[in-house]
Image (cartoon, rainbow, N blue to C red):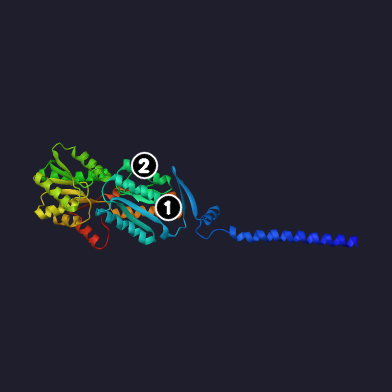
Amino acid sequence: MKKTMAVLMTLVMALTMCSCGQKDQGGSQEATPDAAPAESGSEGDETADAAEGGSEKTVTIGDYTFTIDTAKDPKDIEIPVVYQNVQDIFASYMEEGVLGFAEEKGINAYVTGSNDWSAESQYNLMETLVTKKPDAIAIAAADDQTLTPVINKALEAGIPVLCVNCDAPSSGRLAYLGRDDVEAGREVAKYIVEKLTEKYGEPKGKILMTTTGAGNNWSDQREAGNREIFEQYPDIEIVDFINATGDEQSMYGMLENALLANPDIDAMCNMGGTMDLWGRLMKNQGRTDIIAVGNDLYGDVLSYIKDGYLTCSYGQRVYEQCYGGVEQLYNFLTTGDPASFKENDVPFYIFRVDAANVEEVLEQRESGTPIG
């Protein structure tokens, strides 16, 4: 009897231990759903993808490291393009290039900026963007020295940044798409010297210089190129330098007053922003005797060249600059390849239009080709 009881007790203990083992195992299985990987798009999935060589990549370029998801839905990719004064008509020409690429790929790329030409305003906007952390940024830098710290701040935050139209070469920007504005200034001045020589048989005459953005990279660099050439000719006199600011009416008034104060000028040399208004002034006064050469092809500049109120103006293919800038950033964000960033061919952007080719360029614009 005692032996039978001992056997029974042994069996009970064995069954109890087996039951306890099954309960522990079953408890672990019940806990498994709570520890399951998060839904698609969460940090858990991204970590798993990275571990398996998936879509998340960490890329170092120079001193900066970027972590990107190369499989991100294009509609969720945000690339702001920061201009200086978005109220200026030039911003709309930039926007054509930005939206041209954005619509092609279905991404959220757009032009933004302040309502003045202040480098400080652009700096503040960049700081706000760094806080919001878009996928990448393109910027037409108003001033190299002012914008370099905040461009580097964005790069340090892991935001790829390149420059379009106006460069900040002191920064760590990943590329620059645009022309050499000093060289563009030289080209404008050389053309004026050529026309003055045709007029007088030698390089001499009085020149009025105009701009809308004194103190900004693009204006100061073009002015430097102008003066470098003009200073080679002692009989060329710069009678005044006008920085036409404010609304369109104010700007027009400043140009008109400058002409009243200097009625005998031989040439008007433009850094940018005033060509369309100067053409309007010349048309209103019926004057085709002043050599007028500068930058920009927007507004009615082409028509004024055709009709003789302006002599020549230099464009810079801003559509291609902005399209290409967004394209390079997009390529990097979707591949992680540092070779996505390429410096563009600078001479390509110094694009002259005068009486010799204005009809052809007008036909191109009328057919839908972006000319800026």
Q: Residue furthest right?
A: 1
Mark 2 packing: few (<14 Cα in 10 Å), some, or many (20+)?
Answer: some
Residue toward you, 226 or 334: 334
Q: Residue at x 22, y 61 (%)?
A: 363
Amino acid at pointer 1: Phe
Residue 72: percent from left, percent from top: 45, 58
Q: Horizontally, is 58 left or right of 191 in the view?
A: right
Q: Residue at x 36, y 61 (%)?
A: 103
The disc, 1 or 2, on the residue closer to the chain's N-terminal end is 2
Q: Residue at x 44, y 60 (%)?
A: 73
Q: Nearer the viewer, mark 1 or mark 2?
A: 2
The residue where tag 2 is placed is: 149
Residue 198 location, quadrant: top left
Residue 203: percent from left, percent from top: 14, 41
15 shown above or below 273: below
Mark 1 packing: few (<14 Cα in 10 Å), some, or many (20+)?
Answer: some
Q: Give the structural element (helix, strand or loop) at label 1.
A: helix
Residue 172: percent from left, percent from top: 39, 43
Q: Residue furthest top?
A: 234
Residue toward you, 251 or 371: 251
Amino acid at pointer 2: Pro
The residue where tag 1 is placed is: 332
Residue toward you, 114 or 280: 114
Mark pair 1, 2: CA separation: 23 Å
Residue 96 location, quadrant: bottom left
Q: Is residue 246 visible?
A: yes
Residue 292: percent from left, percent from top: 16, 49
